[in-house]
Image (cartoon, grey):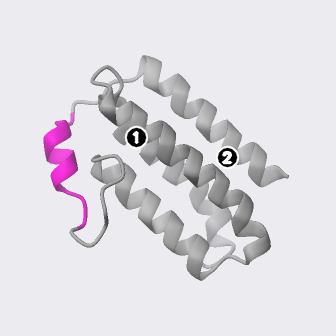
Amino acid sequence: MSQIRTVSGLLLLSAVFAGCSKSSSDAADTAAAVSPTAAAITGVADCDNFLHAYEHCLTDKIPAAASAQMKLGMDQWKSAWKSMAENSATRDALPQICAQTRAASAPALQAYGCTL
């Protein structure tokens, strides 16, 4: 249950930061930094790299009972962040949002032996 709250809280934080945060990174440079083996989800390297690392952890290290709820949260991030990436008014906020989500997710994933 606490994982659901964590994911919900992170989604809420993503929405809040989208409205009030700006980053100076160039979106084109950010998209170009995505690993060539990772399929772009948002086109923002920080976000795509985090999502791929998170998904890898869910698939390879976390038991199915726990990963099912976490996957729902990840799917919500993918959808929300993809929409934000497509909107020029919110795209610049994504690197910061994804970095904060990565930092907030890391402790819970470390319990399963995952590093982001």
**Residue 114 seen from this side:** no
Q: Residue 53 in magenta? A: no
Q: CA distance from mark 1 to mark 2?
A: 17 Å
Contact? badges 1 and 2 (CB < 8 Å): no
Three-letter code for the amino acid on which mark 2 is drawn: Val
User: Residue 61 falls in which quadrant of the image?
Assistant: bottom right
Q: Residue at x 20, y 38 (%)?
A: 27
User: Which class describes the residues within 10 Å of circle 2: few (<14), some (14-19), or many (20+)?
Assistant: many
Q: Which residue is mark 2?
A: 7
Residue 34 in percent (x, y) is at 24, 59
**Is disc 1 placed on a helix, strand or loop?**
helix
Image height check: is 89 above or below 97? above
Q: Please indicate whether residue 68 sits to the left or right of residue 76 in the image.
A: right
**Residue 64 seen from this side:** yes
Three-letter code for the amino acid on which mark 1 is drawn: Lys
**Is disc 2 placed on a helix, strand or loop?**
helix
Q: Please indicate whether residue 104 sits to the left or right of residue 47 in the image.
A: right
Which of the two residues, 47 or 72, is positioned nearer the viewer here?
A: 72
Q: Which residues are magenta?
A: 25-35
Residue 52 in percent (x, y) is at 43, 65
Residue 84 in percent (x, y) is at 39, 31
Mark nearest the camera among 1 and 2 is 1
User: Residue 114 falls in which quadrant of the image?
Assistant: bottom right
Q: Residue at x 60, y 37 (%)?
A: 11
User: Residue 94 falls in which quadrant of the image?
Assistant: top left
Q: Residue at x 45, y 67 (%)?
A: 53
Q: Which residue is mark 1?
A: 82
Q: Please indicate whether residue 115 sits to the left or right of residue 113 in the image.
A: left
Q: Please indicate whether residue 24 sits to the left or right of residue 73 in the image.
A: left
User: Which class describes the residues within 10 Å of circle 1: few (<14), some (14-19), or many (20+)?
Assistant: many
